[in-house]
Image (spheres, grey):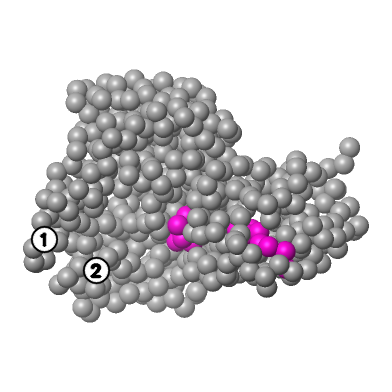
């Protein structure tokens, strides 16, 4: 019997079709899964996948599910993901979650099939400018024109994806593959060099250390990979030694939370709250994050978030920078180690962690956002992966899960809704022995509900809680801010936020996912216990009161 690696080496010597060279090179670079929504132009890639058991092909019914799943997979697997898309229109359908992946700095290779090279000039019906579509969400774009170059181009795509992710500039590399390149002979798989850790900027670290030592009016703002155990502990050391306050980016790609780790507050979304959090500092040091900007502009409101005279100091995205800074301002004691594993430990035998010590009893009665959050915080299993697309409910959920058993929290890093259920698909594929919990707003759930079908088809351990308040509550909040529009009738315009009438239990059943509806806190607790105990996917529709206008976090 020949190993998969031996098969690839044999093919590298003898030559393969272009599609085979692409897949073998991906495997050489550690890519084991492809989330695919293919069409006719990608059939040779699909056929070659069936000849390679080492490459798992996860079928998705919409390109936005494929790209979102690749994002979730990359965040949790900590190695490059891949997605297979059909021509330019398919890429267009997947752009929103490619945008989120770029903002999350997920390393991903997007394989986009295209017409045979000899058809392009004839402008067939699905012909588009794929390079133009891909550019805004990609750190690297290339079109392969010959089978002999397919392996080399794939290796360079992987290197570009890794480099972009490490630099925090976006890790999506888009490789365009004409169908005749894929079916032609002459391809050779390429090797993919191992990635070296990004070095720290020593001068920037030295400058930040001096500022932190000399000035107590400092804020240390962290993000990216620094929201894992090693970075969180380094930040806490710096804060203890210097008196600096700690704050984290609003929507981290992956935030590790567990008893014993600092639970650092995140920058809030509302403009006024964000301004208040960042006010009063002479110096702000950024590690693994860039200076934030307002999500949107408002009439008469500031265009920036920082007070006049506040100096910003950027350490860059490399996790080593924060570790080096901690060693300068807060050296570890003799025998102590600065190196902390970011890999989660195994769940306890009961899976209960510290829940009984850290949480009050379960709430009862009418289901509200606060009660739903309390139920979820109480029953969250150890080593869960939480995918948060709860939108306006998110602050309650984050607060209620503080002190819960160890878990990872994935956020909507790019702000483009429709990421939650697809990212849960990818996270579950990456972590088959961990329970994935999707906290999903009702409005954004309707962007990519096809993810439920993939969860059922693959038997993924995902529990989805739909926070259904029958409203685009964020739009209601934004409409409440609108002033000074002559003749505006906000009573009429609020109709754009009413999305009542959706039946998520029926929708899930149609996708093959068992589902229940919770109308009270008692219902939610009973149904969540059951869902977490069952293998495979499950959906709970949590029926919440409709939010009032300007109700802030009370809606979903």
- Depth check: 115 or 301 in front? 115
- Magenta includes 108? yes
Residue, x 44% and y 45% (percent of image)?
448
- Magenta includes 527? no
Q: Is residue 415 above or below residue 136?
A: above
The answer, for residue 224, to whether it is visible in the render is: no
Q: Circle 2 sits in a helix, a strand or a loop, which is it? A: loop
Residue, x 28% and y 35% (percent of image)?
501
- What residue is shown with label 1? 488
Q: Of marks 2 and 1, which one's residue comes earlier in the chain?
A: 2
Residue, x 85% and y 48% (percent of image)?
6
Within the image, what quadrant is residue 457 found in? Answer: top right
- Depth check: 529 or 452 in front? 452
Residue range in magenta is 96-117
- What residue is shown with label 2? 297
Q: Looking at the figure, which quarter contains the N terminus?
A: top right
| Label 2: how many Cα within 10 Å (few below 14, some 14–19, many 20+) | few
């Amino acid at each position: 019997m020949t190993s998969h690696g031996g098969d690839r080496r044999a093919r590298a010597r003898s030559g393969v079709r272009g599609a085979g060279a692409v897949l073998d090179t991906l495997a050489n670079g550690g890519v084991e899964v492809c989330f695919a929504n293919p069409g006719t132009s990608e059939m040779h890639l699909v056929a070659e996948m069936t000849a390679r058991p080492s490459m798992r092909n996860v079928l998705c019914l919409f390109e936005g599910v494929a790209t979102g799943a690749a994002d979730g997979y990359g965040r949790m697997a900590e190695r490059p993901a891949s997605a297979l898309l059909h021509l330019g229109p398919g890429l267009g359908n997947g752009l929103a979650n490619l945008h989120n992946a770029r903002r999350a700095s997920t390393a991903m290779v997007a394989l986009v099939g295209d017409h045979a090279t000899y058809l392009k000039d004839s402008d067939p019906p699905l012909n588009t400018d794929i390079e133009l579509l891909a550019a805004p969400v990609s750190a690297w774009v290339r079109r392969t024109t010959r089978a002999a170059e397919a392996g080399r181009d794939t290796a360079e795509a992987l290197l570009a994806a890794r480099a972009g992710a490490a630099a925090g500039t976006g890790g999506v590399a888009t490789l365009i593959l004409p169908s005749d390149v894929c079916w032609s002979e002459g391809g050779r798989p390429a090797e993919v060099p191992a990635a070296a850790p990004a070095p720290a900027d020593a001068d920037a670290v030295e400058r930040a250390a001096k500022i932190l030592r000399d000035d107590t009016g400092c804020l240390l703002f962290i993000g990216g990979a620094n929201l894992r155990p090693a970075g969180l502990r380094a930040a806490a050391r710096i804060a203890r030694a210097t008196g600096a306050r700690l704050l984290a980016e609003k929507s981290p790609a992956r935030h590790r939370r567990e008893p014993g780790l600092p639970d650092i507050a995140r920058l809030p979304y509302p403009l006024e709250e964000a301004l208040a959090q960042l006010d009063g500092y002479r110096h702000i040091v950024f590690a693994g994050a860039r200076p934030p900007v307002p999500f949107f502009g408002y009439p008469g409101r500031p265009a920036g978030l920082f007070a006049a005279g506040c100096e910003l100091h950027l350490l860059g995205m490399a996790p080593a920078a924060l570790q080096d800074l901690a060693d300068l301002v807060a050296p570890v004691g003799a025998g102590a180690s600065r190196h902390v594993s970011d890999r989660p430990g195994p769940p306890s035998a009961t899976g209960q962690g510290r829940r009984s010590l850290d949480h009050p009893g379960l709430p009862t009665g009418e289901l509200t956002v606060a009660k739903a959050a309390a139920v979820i915080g109480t029953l969250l299993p150890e080593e869960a992966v939480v995918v948060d697309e709860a939108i306006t409910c998110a602050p309650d959920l984050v607060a209620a899960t503080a002190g819960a058993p160890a878990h990872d929290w994935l956020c909507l890093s790019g702000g483009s809704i429709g990421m939650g259920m697809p990212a849960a698909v990818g996270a579950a594929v990456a972590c088959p022995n961990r329970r994935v919990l999707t906290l999903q707003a009702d409005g954004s759930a309707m962007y990519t509900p096809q993810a439920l079908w993939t969860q059922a088809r693959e038997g993924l351990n995902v529990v989805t809680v739909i926070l259904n308040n029958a409203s685009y509550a964020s739009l209601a909040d934004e409409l409440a801010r609108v002033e000074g529009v002559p003749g505006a009738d906000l009573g009429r315009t609020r109709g754009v936020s009413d999305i009542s009438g959706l039946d998520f239990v029926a929708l899930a059943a149609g996708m093959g996912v068992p589902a229940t509806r919770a109308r009270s806190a008692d219902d939610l607790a009973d149904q969540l216990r059951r869902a977490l105990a069952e293998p495979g996917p499950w959906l709970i529709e949590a029926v919440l009161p409709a939010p009032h206008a300007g109700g802030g976090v009370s809606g979903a």
